[in-house]
């Protein structure tokens, strides 16, 4: 599998390259977003490790660009930074990051987190191509959602959240369980993020949003 690394600190970049090459990954390192964009015009990768504190264009700006383009929106991204504030974590996650690791980090932990993200994002359930409930239809293969005959535009996380609830309709899930299933790990303030995404998802689904039920004191479910 091919992994791209965007890190302006040469020592950290070389360390990550060494660790991943030792684990038999095909890895390429970049100093900034411009170098990454240039290569992405010609080839793709299975995962991007993206430092937040970069010159000229920071990692969050790069992440937003990647998620806004169809050609790169589905590439999983792990944010790597010295920042550890909840605000920075929430921004990265809400922009579509799949994990968030703060410096200093253990090379073995980084490798473990990379493998976890790759497992999670490659576990595509091809046996089920469409999920529906009421007027809501989610097409996994085409990555589109309809309410009745109207197509609804969802972010990557909103789509993943709706897919998870539809795949498990009838079952009630706590915010922690939803966070673990959709975002892949827990972090401080996760209940606010889940609640926010449920709220925006209901708004975008309009009348179809009624299928998402709040179970007081427990969590959410469909059906």
Image (spheres, helix red, strand yellow):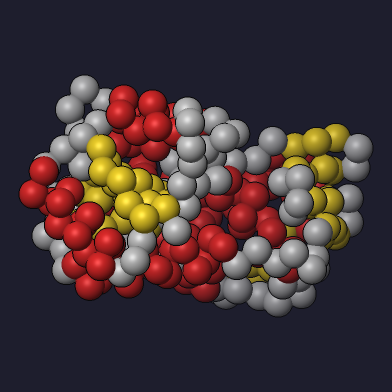
Q: Residue at x 25, y 38 (%)?
A: 30
Q: Is residue 35 above or below residue 221?
A: above
Q: Is residue 13 above or below residue 181?
A: above
Which residue occupies the extreme top position in the image?
56
* In the displayed structure image, the side of residue 117 where residue 109 appears, left or right: left
Residue 31 in the image: x percent, y percent?
21, 35
Judging depth in this view, the residue of 92 and 38 nearest the camera is 38
Q: Residue at x 40, y 68 (%)?
A: 115
* In the displayed structure image, the side of residue 61 where residue 200 appears, left or right: right
* Corner quadrant of residue 21: bottom left
Judging depth in this view, the residue of 21 and 47 nearest the camera is 21
Q: Residue at x 25, y 51 (%)?
A: 80
* In the displayed structure image, the side of residue 66 where residue 114 appears, left or right: left
* Corner quadrant of residue 61: top left
Residue 50 in the image: x percent, y percent?
30, 44
Does residue 196 appear anywhere in the picture? yes
Does residue 52 appear anywhere in the picture? no
Q: Is residue 95 above or below residue 117?
A: above
* Corner quadrant of residue 107: bottom left
Residue 111 in the image: x percent, y percent?
29, 68
- Check the picture and name the quadrant holding the C terminus: bottom right
Q: Residue at x 15, y 51 (%)?
A: 14
């Amino acid at each position: 599998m091919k992994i791209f690394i965007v890190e302006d600190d040469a020592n950290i970049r070389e360390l990550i390259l060494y660790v991943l090459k030792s684990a038999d990954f095909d890895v390429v390192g970049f100093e900034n977003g411009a170098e990454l964009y240039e290569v992405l015009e010609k080839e793709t990768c299975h995962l991007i490790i993206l430092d937040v504190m970069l010159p000229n264009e920071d990692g969050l700006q790069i992440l937003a660009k990647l998620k806004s383009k169809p050609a790169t929106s589905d590439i999983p991204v792990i944010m790597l930074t010295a920042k550890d504030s909840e605000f920075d974590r929430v921004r990265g996650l809400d922009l579509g990051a799949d994990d968030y690791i703060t410096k200093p980090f253990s090379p073995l932990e980084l490798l473990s987190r990379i493998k976890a993200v790759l497992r999670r994002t490659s576990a595509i359930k091809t046996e089920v191509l469409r999920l529906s409930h009421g007027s809501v239809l989610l097409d996994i293969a085409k990555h589109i959602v309809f309410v009745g005959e109207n197509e609804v535009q969802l972010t990557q996380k909103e789509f993943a959240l709706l897919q998870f609830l539809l795949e498990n309709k009838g079952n009630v899930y706590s915010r922690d369980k939803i966070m673990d299933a959709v975002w892949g790990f827990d972090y401080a303030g996760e209940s606010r993020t889940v609640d926010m995404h449920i709220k925006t998802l209901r708004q975008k689904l309009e009348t179809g949003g009624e299928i998402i039920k709040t179970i007081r004191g427990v969590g959410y479910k469909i059906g």
